[in-house]
Image (cartoon, grey):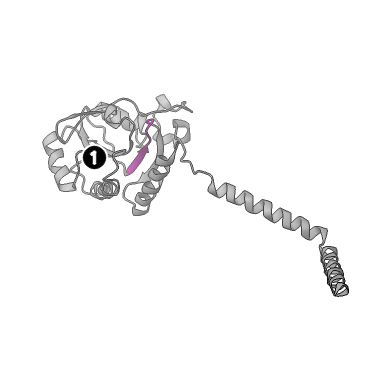
Amino acid sequence: MLNNYFCKTLNGYKLKKKFEEKINPSLLFLLIFSVIMICLIYFLTSKEKKLPIYNPVDINPRLVDASVKHINRGHKIAAFSLLNQNGKIVTQNDYLDKIYVADFFFTKCGTICPVMAKNMAVLQQEFLEDSTIKFLSMSVTPAIDSVFILKKYAIKTGVIDKKWNLTTGDKQHIYELARKSYMAVLDEGDGGKQDFIHTEQFILIDKKRQIRGYYDGTDKEDIQQIIKDIAILKAEK
């Protein structure tokens, strides 16, 4: 019986030694390298995704007013004062600690604006119960888009007052915001009588009033991307 035990032990030792002798150094290196690569890939893919912060130097120069083209850090949306669909004054304080999507429109537009309004309504519905997400639409024809006109448009579009402000105000103020803060239009101008801007851009703004994304407001895929990017912003520390 002792002999059987000794034989089994000896055989086991021989098999182990034989197995160890078969391990090629190159194979061992490949095994270790594979483990390291798997760990590295896991680390990179699990790392928190960040959205870029846009400053004037990061944007197509044609979209940037000459007075701010030199800014390479710290750009924020300027203070504003507008009038919404209910005749209420809306300022940057109404968007304090909020993530919001902004655009420029006019109620008489029969081309891109109805599509943009429909897509903004989709976003509104998506974040209906989230008080940290809001929306801001600024009229580029404020002389035409009175509070009364905006209210009619808001009802037609399905605007929910606590979520989405349709705004009018001083034309030069709105056009300066478009060109120097949101950097949303290609053409130059001073907001004068003959000046007119028309853009399909949706601009994503974070809680620090920084630009975090530009999207085509007429494109359904871009709307879905906004939803994903807002989730990323909400997860930021």
- Which of the 4 quarters of the picture holds residue 180? top left
Magenta stretch contains residue 214: no
Residue at the front extreme of this rendering:
1
Q: What residue appears at the point 33 percent right and 35 percent down from the top-left corner?
A: 98
| Magenta highlight range | 201-209
Q: What residue appears at the point 14 percent right and 31 percent down from the top-left corner?
A: 87
Q: Position of residue 228 (x, y in %)?
A: 40, 48
Work out whether residue 143 or residue 18 is closer to the camera in this orientation and state it. Answer: 18
Q: What residue appears at the point 32 percent right and 47 percent down from the top-left corner?
A: 217
- Whether 60 is drawn above or below 112: the answer is above
Q: Position of residue 51 (x, y in %)?
A: 46, 40
Q: What residue appears at the point 33 percent right and 42 percent down from the top-left corner?
A: 202
Q: Which residue is mark 1?
A: 164
- Which of the 4 quarters of the picture holds residue 8? bottom right
Residue type, mark 1 in image: Trp
- Whether 69 is drawn above or below 46: the answer is above
